[in-house]
Amino acid sequence: MIDKNFSPLRKHFKFQEKIDFFLPNTYVLMAIERSFELLNEIILFHQFDLNNNQEVLEKSPSNEHEYRKVRSFITRELWRIGSFIIFALNLVGILKREYARIKEIHVNLGLSSLEFHQKLLEKREKEIEIYLLYRNKIFAHTAFACPKKRPKKEMDNEAMKWTSLILYFGGLLGYNKHGVTLGQGCMIIEGKRPQKEFPKLSFNQMIDDFKNHFERWYEMLKKICDDIEQFDGDQILHYYNDPWIASLMCAK
């Protein structure tokens, strides 16, 4: 389970001593909380399904009934992995967007530089590049159906297109009592390899990777929110574009 609560980050400010606002934005915190609920439901379903199919997953199928049970489990596991990656990366996008808004305040108040934040963001991007690859080439759409065409040097070649398709329907995978592992082996089509290899990916590895990733996002947001807390709301809103506060000001 991903037991991370971002609510303690919430800082309360007042603008002109009468308009309350918060950093991070309250709706952003609600979206983060809801995202973790979704992700944890997927994890629970994975654990339940795995426990109920241990016997058939520990050996090769010996009859048609066992074969169908294994195939059905693999189908559900692919669905869970794909769904988890898409929801988790949507959450990453939300965190990046809110961090960018608060980062602007942090920089303009003289607390940091853009270069400092850029380096942190590059590290976060590097941590999830395997999941971006699986999302962009398999789970959001396949490279077979929607190949990348620009820029030319990054065009999806035939090997990428066909490898993407085969991974999509459950080829190039293995399974054991711990679940499914994607990216088993590699495809060579027309003497070529995909521009990017698909690293091995398992459900448990995915959970651990995103747990660590979200922990680092929490620490990044905590640092800049704690730093900004020493300033008053009027100073902060000089650099913070919040449409909700703007609408309240117009209403008055």
Image (cartoon, rainbow, N blue to C red):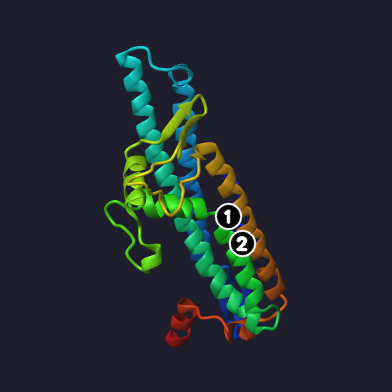
Query: In this orientation, which residue lies closer to the viewer: 159 or 47?
Result: 159
Which disc, if any, is residue 127? Answer: 1
Q: Callout 2 environment at 10 Å: few (<14), some (14 to 19), or many (20+)? A: few
Question: Where is 245 relative to 172, above or below?
Answer: below
**Between 186 and 227, the one nearer to me in the picture:** 186
Secondary structure under the numbered disc 2 in the rendered image: helix
Mark 1: which secondary structure?
Answer: helix
Residue 35: give x, y in percent of width and height.
Answer: 48, 52
Residue type for callout 2: Lys
Q: Quadrant of residue 2?
A: top right
Residue 240: quarter of image: bottom right
Q: Residue at x 34, y 45 (%)?
A: 189
Q: CA distance from mark 2 to mark 1?
A: 6 Å
Q: Is residue 222 visible?
A: yes
Residue 209's place in the image compared with 70, above or below, is: below
- Which residue: 31% across, 58% down? 147
Which residue is identified by label 2?
123
Which residue is located at x 38 percent, y 16 percent?
A: 61
